[in-house]
Amino acid sequence: MSTLKVAAVQFDINWLDKQKNISQLKSMLQDLPQVDLLLLPETFSTGFSINVEGCEEDAINSDVLEWMKVQAYKLNAVVAGSILVKKKNKKVNRFYWVKPDGQIDFYDKRHLFRMGNEQNFVIAGKERKIFKIKDINILPNICYDLRFPVWSRNKNDYQLLINIANWPAARRNAWDVLLQARAIENQAYVIGVNRVGSDGNGVTHSGGTAVYNYLGETIAKIQDDQTGILFCELDFSELEKFKIKFPAYMDSDEFDIKI
């Protein structure tokens, strides 16, 4: 099985300032080495501004999505991150998966953060998605999805779980522990990508962008409260060897998710 080179960006998202955020990202990515996958945090162009009218992108004519396409082409890599997109009279929190050839797929956030009233402004997604690079299957999650293990349960159909987030510092311990738990229980690599800094609602974020292996061990991590890019190369042949030696997935329970 293949290896995968990944870069994950942790930065302080400027509240509602798309141009400044894109400019900051352009600067950070200027000397990026060759990777297969570039990951950006949840709502990387605006911050978690779900209750602000006019901050969402059009599903067809989106400047931010066009920028992602350009970056994917220039970097010859998949570029992934979430933006708020218009849908009916609300929004969706959409994880875009943009390929170098311009092809686009997406996953809409399933679990909406009730304590922040996300459900009042955002429409929940209804489809679990699996994306693919080379022969590696990847399950996308967005922030609050991390708390719901049934949604992320590995049906032996992915090797890597990604969660992109605006996860607050006040609940940072849960972020770290749940990422490790998802890795262990699903026998998969897990990458968590979070922001730093304070948003327009005064919510602070300490980061915690990290990569965990199938044992829940930390492979790579960015320093807390720092802007930076995490680089890692994942060897999926090691995962396969481990699953042959310790095939716990074969004893997992069968179930269906009703939406």
Image (cartoon, rainbow, N blue to C red):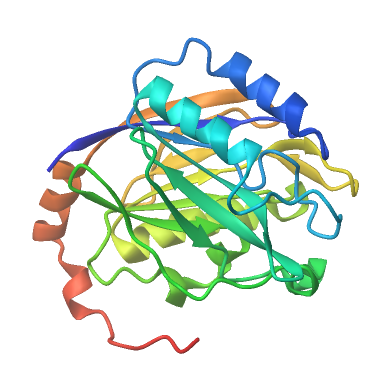
In depth, the one of 66 and 33 nearer the eye is: 66
Instruction: State left or right for residue 169 relative to residue 230.
Output: right
The N terminus, quarter of image: top left
The part of the image, by quadrant, that contains residue 231 is top left
Name the residue: 79% across, 48% down. 55
Extreme residue toward the top, this view: 31
Q: Position of residue 148 (x, y in %)?
A: 53, 72
Residue 208 seen in the figure: no
Instruction: State left or right for residue 131 relative to residue 39.
Output: left
Q: Position of residue 12 (x, y in %)?
A: 73, 31
Disc tally is: 0
Q: Position of residue 258 (x, y in %)?
A: 46, 89
In depth, the one of 149 and 242 nearer the eye is: 149
The part of the image, by quadrant, that contains residue 89 is bottom right
Residue 85 seen in the figure: yes
Name the residue: 57% across, 40% down. 65
Instruction: State left or right for residue 107 relative to residue 85.
Output: left
Name the residue: 53% across, 12% down. 30
Instruction: State left or right for residue 152 relative to residue 157.
Output: right
Relative height, residue 28 to residue 216 (above, below): above
Q: Position of residue 61 (x, y in %)?
A: 62, 45
Extreme residue toward the front, this view: 61
In depth, the one of 219 and 118 nearer the eye is: 118
Name the residue: 39% across, 64% down. 129
In depth, the one of 69 and 217 nearer the eye is: 69
